[in-house]
Amino acid sequence: MKLVGEGADDAGGVFDDTITELCLELTNGTVPFLIPTPNSTNDVGYNRDRFLLNPDLTGTDDLSAFKFIGEVQPNLNCNKAQQVLDIA
């Protein structure tokens, strides 16, 4: 990842902040790619803290975004990131 115009030397902090912001935007509704599980919406059962890929998004750009999310997800786990995407 190249942060153009950020003026920061990255020793892990800038990258971690960027990934944290990405995960927050994906899970707080800023972007529509992930939606809460039905159990979360209804506040019952398991996996209330998880998200699903939004099945309403089927365009080419949407599928590219889903691919990107799939590429980011394993790196979060490998790098012991502070933020994790809990996808059911």
Image (spheres, rainbow, N blue to C red):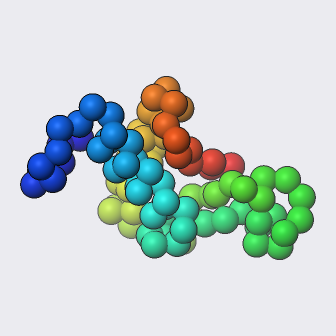
Q: Is residue 78 left or right of residue 55?
A: left
Name the residue rendered at 44%, 70% in the picture: 31
Q: Is residue 23 left or right of residue 17?
A: right
Question: Up-down: is 85 above or below 61?
Answer: above
Q: Nearer the viewer, residue 21 or 9?
A: 9
Q: Position of residue 32 (x, y in %)?
A: 48, 70
Question: Up-down: is 85 above or below 74?
Answer: below
Name the residue rendered at 55%, 62% in the picture: 27
Q: Is residue 44 visible?
A: yes
Q: Nearer the viewer, residue 82 or 40?
A: 82
Name the residue rendered at 15%, 53% in the picture: 6
Name the residue rendered at 63%, 58% in the picture: 52
Question: Up-down: is 49 above or below 74?
Answer: below
Q: How many marks?
A: 0
Q: Is residue 63 visible?
A: no
Q: Position of residue 40 (x, y in %)?
A: 77, 66
Determine the residue located farthest toward the right in the rendered image.
Answer: 45
Q: Quadrant of residue 34?
A: bottom right
Q: Position of residue 13 (x, y in %)?
A: 33, 40
Q: Is residue 36 left or right of residue 43?
A: left
Determine the residue located farthest toward the top in the rendered image.
Answer: 78
Q: Nearer the viewer, residue 11 or 64?
A: 11
Q: Is residue 53 left or right of residue 71?
A: right
